[in-house]
Image (cartoon, rainbow, N blue to C red):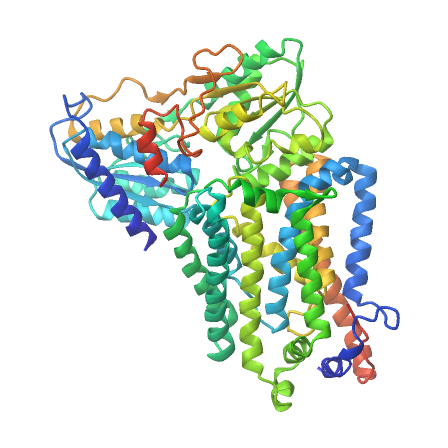
Amino acid sequence: MNKTTILTAAATLAMAMTGSTVLAQTPSWCGPNEASLALLDGFGGNSWRLVTTASGAEEAAKCPSITQYEYADGQGDTQKAISDINSMAARGINAMVVFGDAGPAVLPALTNAHRAGTIVVPYRVNVGGEEGVNYAKFIGSSFFEDGVSWGNWIKEILPEGGNLLFLSGPAGNSQGIDELAGMKSVLDDKYVFINPEPFAVTNWDPSLTQQVLSAEIAKNDKIDVIVSDFGPSLVGALPVFAEFGRSIPALATSDGNSLSCFWEQNKDANPDFKLFTVATGNDNVRLAVQWAVALATGGTPPTDAIFKAPVYENSVTGSPNPVTCRADLPGSIYLSAEMADDAQAKAVGE
Amino acid sequence: MAQYQQTAGQTDMAFDLRSMRPARGFVTVVISTLALLAVCAIFAPSAVSAGGLAGSLPFAAIIAIVGLGQMLVVQQGGFDLSLAGGVSLAVVITTHMSGGDDAQLFTSIAFALGCAVIAGLANGILVGVLRLNAIVATIGMNALLYGAVFAISGGVPRITTPLMAQIAGGKTLGIPHSVLFAIAIMLLVSFVLKKTVAGRRFEAIGANPAAAHAAGLKVRLYQAMAYVFAQLHYCVAGILISGITREPTAFQGDSLLLPSVAVVVLAGTSLLGGRGFPISTVIAAFFLNQLSQFALAVGVPFSAQTIIQALALVFGIGVYSLRWKQAATKRALKSKTEETDNE
């Protein structure tokens, strides 16, 4: 029932966008052959995913050869994600862009769809397998680069070294491990990670983040920098520092409007609160859609096969951007994303 | 069953702590908690520091409140799996309907409570009146509630209103408000269960529905009402979560189902129904939460944290299971001896 609602919503959105986007020229990745496209999400229940989904729909709508656009949400249930993939393949969808949250668990379903002739483009999460054998093309995201960006900034603000606390999502997620490798490639032994190896597990859940952070603060008298790969989930947890009568430390993370606004409101009371963000990467989906559409419609594929999130905000130098809070817009949007701010606000339902 | 029937007869004396031995569940959970606190103080002092407790107690309070709700259902020999949906629905109603506007907060809270009553009545009718299996009925209700969660929120989190954050997340005399709520609810539940006629009948029906029916009590009505009051507990917990967590997800109830059952079992309430132990349940909630804080503070890997919690549960359940087995023979011998538990 829920899936159908989302499908309808996504289809309406896609159609609305086809109507409103000015198609001055068809992008080169959009070929002449007509095709249908599906976006399959492993878990669609947070604002980041909603903006990403809407971005995918917006990108697909740029190509008039795409005659049908479908969306399915696995709701964090691996079984459902697999059955979504199977059902899209059975329905004869020409191309599918898949956020394979469950990792290699969805690979057999992807392989079957690939063998049945569907253009399968998994993105962002590594699902294992091989290009051309299990799917058409994997569009990765360079989490390692994110780690390098954070590491370089930490070196700038803390040249003498210090204590770092790194928070990531579910235990063992490859994103967190890659980010850690990126940071370690630029940070030497002067920088001590005080969290359990490889990162403190938060499941990207705000209430668990709050519990983990308060335990870490109580345990460690000195935390110089907090690194998190989902900045907005920290907003609820950072006020915990006030309980201990300590300033919020420097924060290296990904962007989000609620986080930027939180920084604006709290920077004066917290002298050590510096903020550095990389773009949270909603536009990763656009690259994947471009590839899937190019392969399905006979267009020219983009040159990049890996999405590199640019550095977005730096409260110390203001470059490339100072911290930007749009208090008039919902907290759950991402100003770094290519999608227009107002369209994002609509996508997250506010 | 013999001891249960007697329980119903002795009710007037409950609560008088001096004249009676405390319940085994109470003793077990208090000793375990004190032992855990001692271990924390030695190996992970930060877990029992004022700041550490201030950060973790609100979550213990939430577990306590959902645990009290689940306890009412377990007392009637049931299980309420619609807890996750009930909590999540309350969270999304209070965050989405109010839309961050304080003026709308109380309307949305009233609406959330209304929904909880409806969901609880539906559960109650299905289980209490139509005699459906509790697990089947409530799992279905959970799916329905999640349908409502999606209809209202689309799965998106929203930011709490400042007033709600103040009510649920604030402090009075250094005590988090959520803890005060949990204590108030515990006192209310204890009072109603142990000191009112309705409460005594409720426990008697849970202990032996057939005997209660023979005694002329409205068994089905009481069983149905257990689900209504349980939903109200979940709803209050959800409302509090929306204030404690600044941007709660739409699935906040999911992680509470297992702890809710765990605290009820740890507190010594029989899964077959019967007496409830509200105070022990709240202490067990503190214990369970403190245990995860301990694991976090010691800094063991996440896998070990999960294992520690699982072992604690196995231990808790094991203690009662063993007690039953050992006691069974003795009880068979002196079947008329009273079980002077109290709470």
* Vertical placement of residue A91 versus A121, above or below: below
Pick the residue in front: A171 or A209. A209
Q: What residue lies at 70% left-to-right and 42% top-to-bottom? A: B293
- Residue at image position (48%, 70%) is B121
Q: Taking B260 as reference, is B177 above or below it?
A: above
**Residue at x 75%, y 62% (from the top left corner):** B319
Q: Which residue: 21% across, 34% down?
A: A17
Q: Position of residue A247 (x, y in %)?
A: 66, 24
Depth check: give the residue in front, B133 or A295: B133
Residue B18 image point, x, y percent? 88, 69
* Residue at far left of view: A32
Front residue (pair A5, B313): A5
Split into 4 quadrants, where in the image is the N terminus of chain B? bottom right
Where residue B142 appears, x then y in whole percent? 46, 60
Q: Position of residue B63 (x, y in %)?
A: 63, 53
Is residue B254 among what the camera can see? yes
